[in-house]
Image: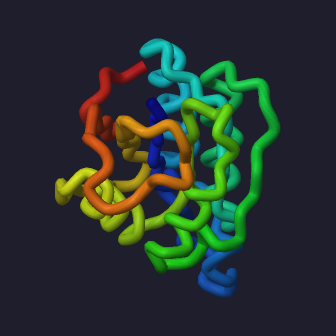
Amino acid sequence: MKTLFLLRHAKSDWADHTLPDCDRPLNQRGRRDAPRMGRLLQELGLVPDLIVSSTAVRAMKTARYVAKHSGFDGPLHEEPSLYSERIDAYLRVVRSLDDPTSRALLVGHNPTMQMLIETLAGRLERMPTAALARLDLPLDRWSQVGAGCGRLAGIWRPRDLEVD
């Protein structure tokens, strides 16, 4: 059994319009919500074995906050292809994960996060910033991941969580 967590990056800051999209930082709400999602993973006993993030600043910062506040103690892996809006790029990353990894967390972007949930679990779900989805995949190997292979086991959105 494999568990795939999908986390959309937390809310980004649009104040500096001269920054390229990939360099946008988190805004105040993003800096609040990302640690909350990390604490949620810890509280639920679902700390991932591996975190792979888009190289966009907002995604990497989200991943760092989640790692710190969940108790994750492994290295963060940066994956440039997760900055893409192409679902095949995300599927390639998932299929290339090492099989000893049971729980993997991808930190990325919409609309690809929503498309990936729909592809793997057959459910259309809204993924606002900092939303976290859990997909249970009854597979032995990550290379077996494909359309309809999983079940959406949970989805958490920051606005639905209790205020810390």
Residue 15 % position (x, y): 57, 72
Screen quadrant of the C terminus: top left
**Relative to 56, 40 lies left or right:** left
> Quadrant location of residue 93?
bottom right
Q: How is the image coloured?
A: rainbow
Q: Is residue 16 above or below residue 56?
A: below
How many labels were placed on the picture? 0
Image location of residue 153, percent across then percent down: 27, 33
Extreme-left residue of the structure: 123
- Report if residue 134 is visible in the image: no
Residue 75 in percent (x, y) is at 81, 38
- Residue 19 appears in view: yes
Residue visible at 36% across and 40% down? 135
Question: Residue 145 vs residue 69: left or right?
Answer: left
Residue at (57%, 30%) from the top-left corner? 102
Residue 108 vertical placement versus 51 (above, below):
below
Looking at the picture, tell me which residue is in the foreground, 107 or 138.
138
Residue 37 picture location, percent across and down: 48, 32
Q: Nearer the viewer, residue 77 or 159?
A: 77
Rendered-image quadrant of the N terminus: top left
Judging depth in this view, the residue of 20 and 70 nearest the camera is 70
Position of 96 compared to 90: left or right?
Answer: right
